[in-house]
Image (cartoon, grey):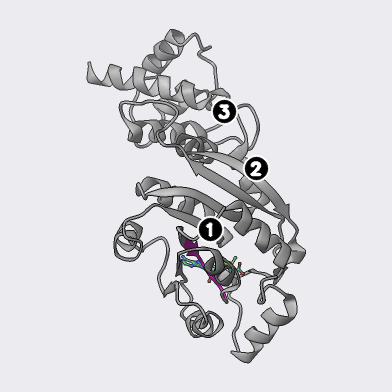
Amino acid sequence: MPELATPAKTMDIIKKHNFFLQKKYGQNFLVDGNILEKIVTAAKINENDYVLEIGPGIGTMTACLAKYAKKVICIEIDKKLIPILEETLSEYDNIIIKNEDILKVDINRLIKDDCNGCQIKVVANLPYYITTPIIMSLFEQSIPIQSITVMVQKEVAERIKTGPGTKDYGALSLAVKYYADPEIIMTVPPTCFIPKPAVSSAVIQLKKHPKPPVSVADENLLFAIIRAAFNQRRKTLANALSNAENISFKRNDVIIALQKMSINEAVRGEALTLLQFAELTNLLSKDNAN
Ligand code: SAM
């Protein structure tokens, strides 16, 4: 059983260091050893693995990861947690602690320097206020990632997993499916954290595709079209794309492309699959090239 993952031990450490939990950093520390073991088991960490942990907190998950991994690199934004981590993790010689903002750090550089350029596994209990930017930046920076196993808000996990025609379906679901295969591992109640978050949580695993499941000539255009479609999700797709800020398609061109795909011109973006968005992107980028 991981030693730090109990309410009593966590409170001891917080009090001993006179540490004040920061809501602005999404600090909800995991205090349930069984959940922690299940996360590390789901991530299938072994002695050859380089692991990136985002937001180690007081080191509860870090210590558990370090027992199985070759090396754990953890990135923590709150400098007041660094002396605590140095103490709680002092018995491990395979952990690197960095006081950085995960959204600003150059992860590719870090992998070259600290992981011999090897593929990494990302494991974390994410700060919920920046879940989407973290996941998107991990994918968009073309980092050599094998898998991402993270605790997120339950609602976000459902949004990632869902398909067309549901109210949760959106740009995040499509972007994640472009890069990875998502699986919800388990749901986790608020009682497993200190302090208890207002929402339920879930552990989601994203196994990166060796190559995207659809092929597009212009990846940036695909994501611009997806974002535009869901920014104005109550509008028809043709209206949403012809009114979008950063792309400029004529409404009629979108309608012609939809007709070529045998899709009704009154369709909304929320009805299209990733494959259909890819096909539309290729038709519209061809139009642009003409
Ligand atoms: N891993 C610990 C656990 O499971 O108990 C803590 C998880 S807590 C939900 C999120 C952690 O992310 C906090 O330690 C917080 O300070 C850190 N954090 C928040 N924003 C961050 C950022 N931009 N970069 C790196 N760490 C961040």
Tell how many labels.
3
> What stretch of residues is rendered in magenta?
52-57
Q: Name the residue tied to disc 2.
A: 158
Give the quadrant of residue 112. bottom left
On the rendered structure, is 228 left or right of 61? left
Instruction: Please give the name of the residue rendered at 64% of the width and 85% of the height, measured from the top-left corner.
Output: 13
Instruction: Please give the name of the residue rendered at 45% of the width and 77% of the height, measured from the top-left corner.
Output: 93
- Residue 1 percent location from the top left of the image: 70, 70
Nearest to the observer: residue 182 or residue 158: 182
Q: Secondary structure at mark 1?
A: strand
Q: Which of the marked residues, 1 or 2, is nearer the chain's N terminus? A: 1
Observer able to see residue 244 = no
Give the quadrant of residue 120. bottom left
Amino acid at the residue labelled 3: Glu
How many C-alpha atoms fall within 10 Å of the one at disc 1: few (<14), some, or many (≥20)? Answer: many
Q: Which of the marked residues, 3 or 2, is nearer the chain's N terminus? A: 2
Quarter placement of the C terminus: top left
Q: Name the residue tied to disc 3.
A: 270
